[in-house]
Image (tube, coloured by chain):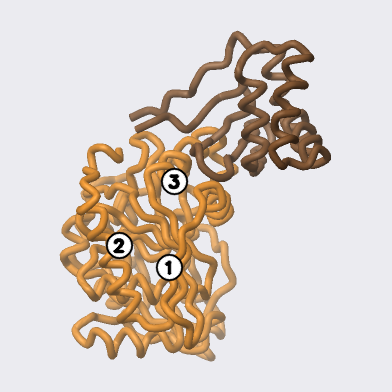
Amino acid sequence: MEDTSWALNRNLRLADWREGDAIAYLGDSGDLHVINELTRKILGIFQSGPLTLGELSERMSFLTTHGEDPHYLGRQVVQLESLGVLYALSAERESITPLKIKR
Amino acid sequence: MNIPTKSYQIGPFSVAVSTDVAEIDRGIESFYQGFKPVNAKFFDFHISLEQPRGVRRWFRPQIDFVFDGIRPFKPLPRTQGLALFEWGLNWCITNHCHEYLTIHAAVIERNGFSLILPAPPGAGKSTLCAALVCAGWRLLSDELALINLEGANCIAPLARPVCLKNESISIIKQASPSSRFGKTCTGTNKGDVAHMMAPASSVELIDECAVGRLIVFPRYIANSKTILTRRSKATTFFEMARQSFNFHVLGSKGFEALESVVTRSDCYDFEYSNLDEAIELMTELSDQQLVSGVSTEELI
């Protein structure tokens, strides 16, 4: 069965079923956050690799030209930032590995 | 006075229980007949149900739940002693057993796949659980889903009696006259309460874990149609975590265990008022798992 649980950094786990919303879990506080589909798409952009500002702008523009509200887009980026995802991706990019589920 | 202690292996837990009230003693014995006695000096829980000293021993008699010498609750009327034992044992498990992720849910099994019914009190979880058990499903638990943290997606059975309240008691008694019930406790905080004993077939399989496959959030709504709707895994995860007693205690281990069960399960919301239709639909859902060709090994 495909892995659906990811460790984005030491503190942040993501359960992503590739359909609908995902769940983010913050280890230090024990908080759960719902990551909606749009946020998942944005996360996918950030996860795709190191991007120049131009590339980032281009991919974000792709989402807005495909019906997403730019203001809403901004809110999702803020959510990712508040969860520490953006920091995790920039500072610990090398350590991002899928979390293997014990079987 | 030296009160004899009885011991039972209830699923993964060893319980030593003693009481100085003959009626409660007989009730517990009938609830747990078929459970193996424990030949050990160590028990997970030492419980006694004791009559208080003083006037309450005779006037409007009461009973105390004593756990390791501590009285965690106010005494209840002596006639509610059996219900107090069951509620107290739930409290012992949810507060002390963190080797499992414990969720407020009924769990039953058919064809090797388990059906988890998480729900807040009053949603109709126990009634549906009892009806399915009477229809031949195996009872794992009416109240607590114990999800194993080591072997992911494995649910440990308890096979304790199903706690039914108010109208549910007569509904299940009528639906299944052969099922065995304890004495009805009247006037409790939850109204009238009666316990339906676990079938012998469920008690025999108490050492066998079940694999999570279906998660259904039941809701009894009077005169409603029988409606089963798909539910997203994210909202299922969120609600299961909310219904958990120790998700916050277990940290990332709890997250991994719950994620494993939710990932491998089909998730639904379920509204019902007609028990026959509900049984038919749940049985159909269970049969679909066989048709889908997924084996229990693939889900562990």
Q: Which numbered disc covers residue B166?
A: none
Q: Position of residue B130 (x, y in %)?
A: 32, 74
Look at label 2 and name its amino acid: Leu
Q: Are marks 1 and 2 in contact (CB under 8 Å)?
A: yes
Look at label 1 and name its amino acid: Leu
- In the figure, the orange chain has which letter? B
Q: Position of residue B181 (x, y in %)?
A: 29, 81
Q: Quadrant of the N terminus of chain B?
A: bottom left
Q: Nearer the viewer, residue B242 or B202?
A: B242
Q: Position of residue B145 (x, y in %)?
A: 40, 55
Q: Are marks 1 and 2 on the same chain?
A: yes
Q: Earlier in the sequence, mark 1 or mark 3?
A: 1
Residue reaching furthest to the top: A94
Residue receiving disc 3 = B262
Q: Earlier in the sequence, mark 1 or mark 2?
A: 1
Q: Are marks 1 and 3 in contact (CB under 8 Å)?
A: no
Q: Secondary structure at mark 2?
A: helix
Q: Earlier in the sequence, mark 3 or mark 2?
A: 3
- Local packing at callout 2 (Cα closer than 10 Å; few below 14, some 14-19, many 20+) is some
Whether A98 is drawn above or below B67: the answer is above
Q: Nearer the viewer, residue B252 or B196?
A: B252
Q: Which numbered disc covers residue B228?
A: 1
Tell me which chain the residue with mark 2 is part of.
Answer: B
Tell me which chain the residue with mark 3 is part of.
Answer: B
Residue receiving disc 2 = B285
Residue at 66% from the left image edge and 39% from the top image edge: A38
**In this rendering, does residue B25 appear at all?**
no
Q: Secondary structure at mark 1?
A: strand
Q: Secondary structure at mark 3?
A: helix
Colour that chain A carries in the picture = brown
